[in-house]
Image (cartoon, rainbow, N blue to C red):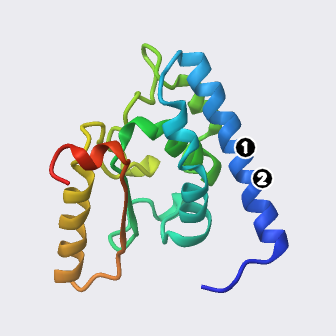
């Protein structure tokens, strides 16, 4: 991967700021916890979804798309905001986060069309799921890459 230009860096910083605004708005509206868990992963999600991952709204269900697993599901406001900014769904959907009848739950629920590959929230299981997906891709000689983001706390739980 090539080096970033100053213009690209500033664009990614702008996206990160907008995602943080989205997170703050979602968490405030839903009176939800875990704002720190969401804020702490914003730059990683920007790097993945806007530079690294071979996945887009147009190929969200393609067989060889890259996979991202947010093992620490409690950080999902950041994932939802990044996916909305990337075009997987309309940003107005974020207004339905964590409310009765809403379309975005407090932990991710699998919906590949929206870019959510795995239901998470039970800490410590994403790595096992990701390892299985990566091994399956290797066996099928797929070019798919699998990325899994864990939290520090979950490395003490589950099957990590």
The vertical placement of 52 against 46, above or below, is: below
Outermost residue on the right side: it is: 7
Q: Position of residue 26 (x, y in %)?
A: 59, 26
- Is 122 or 99 nearer to us in this picture? 122
Count up the numbered dots: 2
On-image quarter of the N terminus: bottom right
* Viewport quadrant of the C terminus: bottom left
Q: Which residue is mark 2?
A: 14
* Residue drawn at (53%, 57%) of the image: 57
Compared with residue 105, is residue 127 higher up or lower down, i.e. above or below?
below
User: Crowdedness of circle 2 by 10 Å Cα count: few (<14), some, many (20+)?
Assistant: few
Query: Which residue is at 43% across, 13% downward?
Result: 100
Instruction: Calculate the distance from the C-alpha at mark 2 to the C-alpha at mark 1.
Output: 6 Å
Residue drawn at x 44%, y 52% is 115
Q: Is residue 18 left or right of residue 88?
A: right
Q: Please, what secondary structure does the residue beneath circle 2 have?
A: helix
Tell me if 140 is positioned left or right of 12 in this view.
Answer: left
Residue 90 position in % (x across, y down): 61, 40
Question: Which mark, by number, is residue 60?
Answer: none
Residue placed at 25% from the left, 72% from the top? 134
- Of the pair 44 and 59, the residue shown nearer to us: 44
Q: What percent of the width, then of the height, locates residue 30?
A: 53, 17
Drawn side of residue 17 relative to residue 158, left or right: right
Q: Residues within 10 Å of mark 1 (few under 14, many from 20)?
A: some
For the residues bearing labels 2 and 1, Cβ distance under 8 angstroms: yes
Q: Secondary structure at mark 1?
A: helix
Task: Name the residue carrying label 1.
Answer: 18
């Amino acid at each position: 991967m090539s080096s970033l230009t100053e213009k690209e860096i500033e664009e990614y910083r702008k996206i990160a700021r907008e995602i943080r605004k989205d997170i703050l708005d979602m968490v405030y509206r839903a009176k939800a916890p875990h704002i720190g868990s969401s804020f702490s992963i914003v730059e990683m999600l920007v790097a993945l979804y806007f530079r690294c991952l071979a996945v887009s709204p147009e190929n969200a269900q393609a067989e060889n798309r890259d996979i991202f697993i947010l093992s620490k599901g409690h950080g999902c406001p950041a994932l939802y905001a990044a996916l909305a900014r990337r075009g997987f769904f309309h940003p107005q959907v974020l207004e339905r986060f964590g409310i009765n009848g809403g379309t975005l739950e407090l932990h991710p629920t699998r919906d590949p069309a929206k870019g959510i590959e795995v239901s998470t929230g039970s800490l410590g299981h994403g790595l096992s799921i990701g390892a299985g997906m990566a091994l399956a891709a290797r066996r099928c000689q797929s070019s798919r890459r699998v990325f899994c983001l864990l939290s520090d706390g979950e490395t003490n739980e589950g099957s990590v």
